[in-house]
Structure formats: structure tokens, C-alpha cells
Amino acid sequence: MLLSTLKQLQGKDHRSFFHKPVDVKEVPDYLDIVSCPMDFSTMKKKIQSQQYFHLRDFQKDFDLIIDNCTLYNAKTTVYYQAALKLKQAVSLFSHSILYLSLFFKSDSIEDDLHQY
């Protein structure tokens, strides 16, 4: 179910800016500004290796993608604007999270649901 939600989010990233990690060879100062990089391929690996124990952790990684992009890039860049558009997908994301809660086995699922 998390993979399905991730695919929906990736579908909103029409230019694939957030599909792979930022290449620090192309953007050498990126890690000077962004302390915890995140992208969709990293999220997919975390899903596949069952590293998400709570739904809120999945959402935090999604939020981190947006936060990193808006922190590093100027408001006038296509990257910043793409991040804002992707952020608008949060309503879809939140609905998917609520749906996932029906299937996600977690001791703290009620706590997770109260986050949304």
C-alpha cells in the first residue's frame, strides 16, 4: 500500500525532480545547506526494506523532500515551484494515508491517525 501511495506522489512530480537524490557532484554545496537529503527512490528503498514502522514516518520523509527543496532553492526557481505544486498533493497523500491505516499494522496506529 505504501508503494501505491508513493507512486501517486511520484505521478505529481511531472519533471521527476524528486525521483532521485540530488547529485552532489553537480550541486557541491547541497549538503552544506541540507542536512538530511530525501527523495522518492530513497523512500522506495525504505518501503522495500520495511523501515517505515509508522505512517507518520512516511509522511515526514515526504515533507522532508519539500522542505529540503524550498530551503535550498530560491523562490523563483522551477525546483521551488515544483515543490510547492507537489505539496498541493498532500490532500491526496493524506487521503491515501487514512486509507492505508486500515491495513497498516502498528501499535500506535491511532496516534498516527490523530496526526491527520
Image: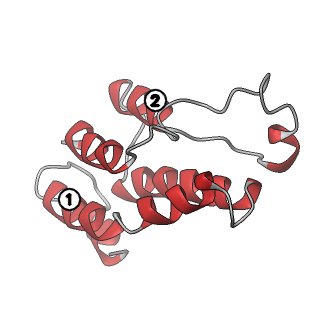
Q: Amino acid at mark 2?
A: Ser
In terms of depth relative to the viewer, which is nearer, 9 or 47? 9
Residue 28 rendering spot, x and y as whole percentages: 86, 31
Residue at 34% from the left image edge and 63% from the top image edge:
89
Residue at 28% from the left image edge and 67% from the top image edge:
94
The image's mark for residue 96 is 1
Residue 69 to residue 98: above or below: above
Does label 1 or label 2 sit earlier along the sequence? 2
Residue 96 rendering spot, x and y as whole percentages: 20, 59
Residue 56 rendering spot, x and y as whole percentages: 41, 59
In terms of depth relative to the viewer, which is nearer, 30 or 38? 30
Residue 84 to residue 55: above or below: below
Q: Is the C terminus in the top left, top right, bottom left or bottom right quadrant?
A: bottom left
Residue assigned mark 2: 41
Direction from residue 67 to residue 17 in the image, left or right = left
Q: Amino acid at mark 1?
A: Ser
